[in-house]
Amino acid sequence: MNYFLRVLVVLFSLNTLHLMSQSDKVVLAIHGGAGTILKKNMTPEKEKAYHEKLTEALKAGYAVLQKGGTSLDAVEAAIVVMEDSPLFNAGKGSVFNSDGKNEMDAAIMDGSNLKAGAVAGVHTIKNPIKAARAVMEKSEHVMLIGDGAEKFAQEKKLEIVEPKYFYDEYRYQQYLKAKEQNKIEMDHTDSVKTKSKPDKHGTVGAVALDNFGNISAATSTGGMTNKKYGRVGDAPIIGAGTYANNNSCAVSCTGHGEYFIRAVVGHEIASLIEHKNLSVKEAAEKVILEKMVKMGGEGGVIVLDKKGNMAMPFNTEGMYRGYITSEGKVYTAIYKEGN
Ligand code: ASP
């Protein structure tokens, strides 16, 4: 083979390798909360239900991407599936605050232009993530709270429900127990069942990459059981629980919100990538497995960049999580060791 041909062959195989690794890229990753999620406290039925719901959420977001939809549409579609399920602490199934009410927070961010929208302390909007998106696209603001956010959602014709729609008996028992013990608890706690240390989290989040090469992030939560009325967690705070920037990554967090706010986790991970050239994995692990551990902040994160590199570290026993690749390969897991 002459020199010219050899060069062509090498170039061709390099390109094929590149395409192969490209086709394996992650296009959507989700979480459904982190915490002391132990196999011994789980029934096979519940385990199956979580895997199925995570898969449904991934497929809903993936279908949007397949049709040429944006990463914003994909994260919203995945979050809506989880908000509509009582398995997660977001939308239906949200935890109760110290007044025995459900007060929800949500945020969404577009990494292509840094536009963002958020709502906090809402209690009649069926899908808080849709309200967050409406704030981003149909107002001049980034965050609306409480009654103002509700009024805005009504004006924008979003679905409004009676507060009792969010009622879930198991969550209510969690609340009564927490109130009796004068504790503020993370969700997914088994303290009702097992009287174990209550330290689980149940927020939902999604990060996606679309065919245009843009990334987005979204997070939705009921917050923490028995939280003080009016308390706002990290999820709706841009740069803390939710962040997206094409130059670095898309991030969605779950965990003890106060710590995630103080450590500005989302933006911290993005800054390590953009300014220190850390990989997605290195940056996410540095913040969640080093910094947050030192601070005592429990939780986890999902991070995705525009090349489809993804990381999902957590410093708790488990985190409901999953991802789907550009070829449609689905992976879901609950425990530290996987599945
Ligand atoms: N981060 C949420 C909050 O503090 C709770 C969670 O992730 O479960 O509101």
Image (cartoon, rainbow, N blue to C red):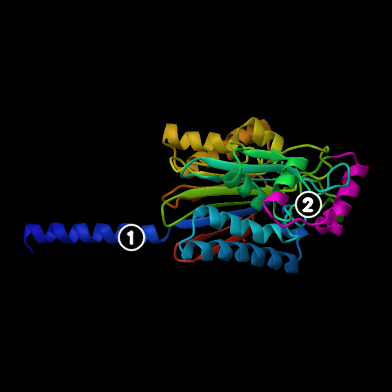
- Answer yes or no: is residue 254 visible: yes
Q: Is residue 169 magenta?
A: yes
Q: Nearer the viewer, residue 257 or 294?
A: 257
Give the left or right position of residue 99, taking residue 206 as reference: right
Outermost residue toward the right in this view: 180
Viewport quadrant of the N terminus: bottom left
Residue on which the image places disc 2: 124
The amino acid marked with disc number 2 is Thr
Outermost residue toward the left in this view: 2
Viewport quadrant of the C terminus: bottom right
Q: Nearer the viewer, residue 14 or 113?
A: 113
Q: 278 above or below 163?
A: above
- Does the beta carbon of the residue at mark 2 sit less than 8 Å from ligand 1? no
Residue at left offset 56%, top offset 65%: 59
Q: Which is nearer the N-term, disc 2 or disc 1? A: 1
Relative image position of residue 209 (x, y in whole percent): 47, 53
Residue on which the image places disc 1: 19
* Magenta stretch in the rendered image: 154-183
Under circle 2, the secondary element is: loop
Q: Which mark is residue 303?
A: none
- Answer yes or no: is residue 313 visible: no
